[in-house]
Image: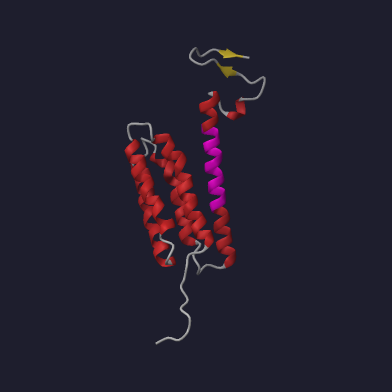
Amino acid sequence: MGAGPEVQARIERRQLGLSVGAVAAAVPGLLFGLDSYYGGFFILTMLPLTLPPLLGRSPRVFAQACVIIALALVTWSVMGAVPGMYLFLPSAALLLLAAATGPRRSTGTARLLGWAGVLVLAGVAAGTAVWCWTLYDGSPPAAAHDGALRTHKGQGRIQQ
């Protein structure tokens, strides 16, 4: 009969942030494929990503769930590359980073892996911004300044 306080291991905030970031990184891919013929597959791909943030009790179970879901997601992304499932690859990378920044890592290594996750999220945000810009304007942002050559939509002419 232990008289001492029971110490319960919890996942770190960095791990939780990376796993929530994996869900956030999958939202643009979900929005991209939602109105296509394969919209149901995009929804079913997104559902398992929501599990790791909910498994915040045990670091071991959290890390195992992150690795299993990430490896399944990489496999699914490669097999479903044609309809656009590769858009979920950044989420798989973030889940692997979340599993790797466990409590047994040194502070420097965990901090470095956390910043790698921030860079992955920044890349997803930049890619989403470019995608939204092309939907709005029809041209990539590099050609959007004054004086750039643009093709006229539908006729293929170049205008100044």
Q: Is residue 155 above or below residue 32?
A: above
Percent position of residue 142, x then y: 61, 29
Q: Residue at x 53, y 23 (%)?
A: 138
Q: Residue at point 51% right, 62% down?
A: 101
The structure residue drawn at horizontal position 56% and vertical position 63%, both measured from the top left corner, is: 109
Magenta stretch secondary structure, dominant = helix
Left or right side of 140 for 41: left
Q: Is residue 99 magenta?
A: no
Of residues 74 and 2, the one drawn nearer to the viewer in this rendering: 2
Residue 139 screen position, x and y as percent: 55, 25
Residue at horizontal 52 percent and vertical 32 percent from the top: 132
Q: Quadrant of the C terminus?
A: top right
Residue most toward the right? 146
In the picture, measured across the screen, residue 46 lies left or right of residue 28, that is: left
The magenta stretch is 117-131
Rendered view: 111 above or below 36: below
Locate residue 94, reporting x and y percent: 48, 52
153 is higher (above) or lower (below) than 89: above
